[in-house]
Image: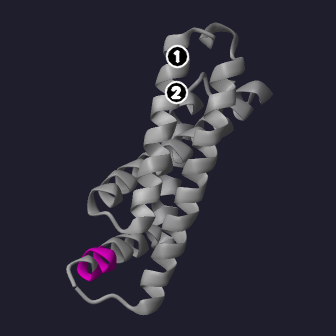
Amino acid sequence: MYYSRAQVARGRTVINIGVIILNILVLLNFPYDFFFENARRIEVLRGSIVNELFVIIVTFFYYRGNRLASWFMAFFLHAIGIRMILMLIMLVTGLLTRSGLMNLGDGILYILVPVILVIAACWLISRIQIYEDCIAYWIYQKENARK
């Protein structure tokens, strides 16, 4: 398939921003696990350290051009994107609940507001074509790895 250089460049930018966000979240996860009151057990800290090292090693090999690492990174970034959308929906729903606006209409807004936000997020993602740019970059990267 043919993709323009601008689309591949936008995809590379989105992927690199996603990798940076992923690494920041991973590095912030360890202090959270360490200082969280119920998580001072060694099993929780050991699992946290293993997960963080795995993500950091995958990131290193991704930038070195490893194909398996790029598959793992694609999985991580898709999971982060879905989680970020769900967190924003939960934040808006929580703010509306705290303000008392969700109780209007006998609670029907508890169903409608998340559905409307999911539809709006999907429409926004398709409208600004983030996903297509990322796919263009992954295909470009796969084609150049074969050369």
| Above or below, comparing residue 74 to residue 26 in the picture | below
Which portion, as a residue range, is magenta?
139-144
| Above or below, comparing residue 54 to residue 140 in the picture | above
Whether label 1 touches label 2, CB < 8 Å: yes
Magenta stretch: dominant SS?
helix
Residue placed at 42% from the left, 45% from the top?
A: 79
Residue placed at 33% from the left, 88% from the top?
A: 3
Magenta stretch encompasses residue 25: no
Relative to 43, 36 lies left or right: right
Image disc number at residue 44 = 1
Relative to 136, 95 lies left or right: right
Q: What element carries label 1?
A: helix
Estimate how packed mark 1 is, as few (under 14), some (14 to 19) or many (20 or more) residues with alpha carbons within 10 Å. some
Image disc number at residue 66 = none
| Above or below, comparing residue 10 to residue 50 in the picture | below
> Can residue 82 be seen here?
no
Relative to 32, 110 lies left or right: left
Name the amino acid type tagged 1: Val
Foreground pick, 121 / 15: 15
Q: Which residue has dot 2 on it?
A: 48
Q: How many marks?
A: 2
Foreground pick, 105 / 96: 96
Q: Position of residue 140 (x, y in %)?
A: 32, 80
Foreground pick, 56 / 9: 56
Residue placed at 28% from the left, 82% from the top?
A: 144
Residue placed at 40% from the left, 58% from the top?
A: 61
Q: In what quadrant of the picture does the C terminus appear? A: bottom left
Name the amino acid type tagged 2: Ser
